[in-house]
Image (tube, rainbow, N blue to C red):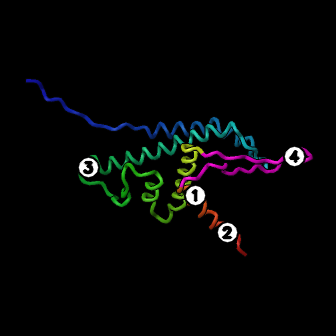
Amino acid sequence: MPRKSEVQESISNLSMGLIEHGLTLLQTHSFPVYKKNIDQRDPPFAPTEFTPSAIAILLMTSGLDYHLARLKWFRDITPQTPPLPFPTYFNWNIGDSLSEKISKLLIQKNERSLKEQLVELTIVRDSVAHPRLYLVKQAMHSDFSFSKPRAELSRGAELRPKALRRKLRAQNEQSHFDCP
């Protein structure tokens, strides 16, 4: 009589590789450009830094999202005896957006700054993954010096609702600081 075969289940772990490669891109390609321009009052736009930074943001946010989904899988889908603690930290679904997972995961008052920075990173990721065209304007003066570059969203491009909400909130907070 043939022996019954056993099936072993596992999930892959891409998160470590994605985060590692993102940090390597920043360290080897972007940081040298920042380091070179760190002492300048108005660092110039550095095209050699943009691409590695954009790719690193995609890799690191995807790695974080994958890691959180993996934790949720271990917490809620795989059987644990006794059940794991901290159920309130996992009140989100695997398929939820990364910003929603972060907002529900980081609920302590001392985690507020980290939560804001991570949500901001997801907005940067959205601008890379869902491209928006920005017009970079810089004036050249008669003495051949340049004004500070400005970037604005080009005509026909729209911000996603999440980015628009955050921009408006940042402007409102800034206007409170500007009041005498």
Identify the mark at residue 80; answer none if there is no mark: 3
Mark 2 near mark 3, Cβ–Cβ under 8 Å?
no
Residue 73 is left or right of residue 138, and the answer is left
Looking at this view, name the residue that lies furthest to the right.
143
What is the three-letter code of the residue carrying label 3? Gln
What is the three-letter code of the residue carrying label 2? Ser
Element at badge 1? helix
Q: Position of residue 99 (x, y in %)?
A: 48, 54
Element at badge 3? loop
Element at badge 2? helix
Among numbered discs 1 and 4, the one appearing first in the sequence? 4
Q: Spatial distance from mark 1 to mark 4, Cα to Cα? A: 34 Å
Provide the residue designation for mark 4: 145
What residue lies at 79% left-to-right and 47% top-to-bottom? Answer: 138
The residues colored magenta run 132-160
> Against 160, is 62 above or below?
above
Q: Spatial distance from mark 2 to mark 1, Cα to Cα? A: 16 Å
Provide the residue designation for mark 2: 175
Identify the mark at residue 164; answer none if there is no mark: 1
Query: Which of the two discs, 3 and 1, sits closer to the camera?
Result: 1
Q: Spatial distance from mark 2 to mark 4, Cα to Cα? A: 31 Å
The answer to whether residue 134 is magenta is yes
Q: Spatial distance from mark 3 to mark 1, Cα to Cα? A: 42 Å
What residue lies at 49% left-to-right and 66% top-to-bottom? Answer: 109
Among numbered discs 2 and 3, the one appearing first in the sequence? 3
Which secondary structure dominates the residues rendered in magenta? loop
